[in-house]
Amino acid sequence: MDYQAVLDEVAAHVKPQIGRGRVAQYIPALASVDADRFGIAIADVDGHVTGVGDWERPFSVQSISKAFSLALVLADDGEKLWRRVGREPSGNPFNSLVQLEYENGIPRNPFINAGALVVTDRLHTLTGDASTTMLDFLRAESGNPDLAFDQEVAVSESAHGDRNAAVAHFMASYGNLHNPVPTVLEHYFWQCSIEMSCRDLALAGGFLARHGLRADGSRLLSQSEAKRVNAVMLTCGTYDAAGDFAYRVGLPGKSGVGGGIVAVVPGRCTLCVWSPGLDARGNSVAGVAALDHFTTLTGWSVF
Ligand code: GLN
């Protein structure tokens, strides 16, 4: 497969979609990002990476971090996590509170904000420093020691974080956070603020295509656990658009409001696409279109 040619064709195909949608506004530091950016990268299971467009330009990973925090907790803790968070699609927006009351403070899945806060809480208990653990992991997997938090984004989100604070306090009222709410929120905002490029993320998500093996060949997840993370990405990774994403793209994927999406072709490769214009559900318009066209061209969906 000539990845470069495929990615060039994908980029040409989605050109009319670039700049469509809206850049996330509710985190003020994200609102100034240029909507006309587009990049896509593909890393094969041997760590060879190819990209086009703005594939080496860092952006805010936001909720893509939720796939990595889930993997890190499963690696350490195994199945125990599922006592505190479910694994069903929510059918509701990523920052929704409504289901928490009916389900006694147990979030629907680890990829909506409520679920990710529980995962961050557990990672913090396990490691003593959830956000640094994640940054170290991402540096190692991407081979990029310069990865860093974006302090402006973290502070900006914290200053406008009433919704996430409400979600966290509500879960704490059911005893489903074990660290103080401000600590959990702080680590959650820091991990969302990490800046990475498509190149970095395609490489960092390589363990999901390698059935759980890290970049250095050591094992992070069992084959079964890697399948499970991919399964939750497929069913919940793009929130209330997960059905449409499966229909159009047919791959496990995890999006973020920075405009990035990581998608996995198990056994073959990991992709990352970035374009900041979002649809109403918070997924990149051009990003979904690019992955849609990629799987149409290659036939590489999980279906
Ligand atoms: N940090 C963002 C939030 O909590 C992440 C949301 C997202 O990327 N979908 O609202």
Image (cartoon, helix red, strand yellow):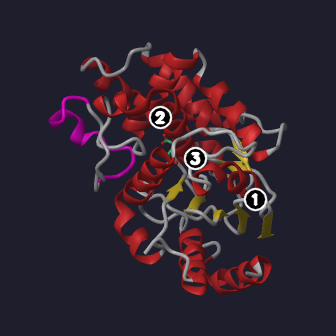
Disc 1 or disc 2, which is closer to the eye? 1
Residue 37 seen by the camera: no
Decide which of tag 3 and tag 1 comes sooner along the chain: 1
Q: Amino acid at mark 2?
A: Leu
Q: Secondary structure at mark 1?
A: loop
Decide which of tag 2 and tag 3 comes sooner along the chain: 2
Question: What residue lies at 31% left-to-right and 22% top-to-bottom?
Answer: 176
Give the quarter of the image for residue 193: top right
**x and y percentages locating residue 267 in the rendered image:** 59, 63
Give the numbered dot on residue 74.
Answer: 2
| Residue position marked by numbered label 3 in the rendering | 212
Confirm whether the magenta stretch covers residue 94.
yes
Disc 2 or disc 3, which is closer to the eye? 3
Q: Secondary structure at mark 3?
A: loop
Main SS, magenta residues: loop
Give the quarter of the image for residue 130: top right
Mark 3 and 1 residues: CB-CB less than 8 Å, in contact?
no
Magenta region: 92-105
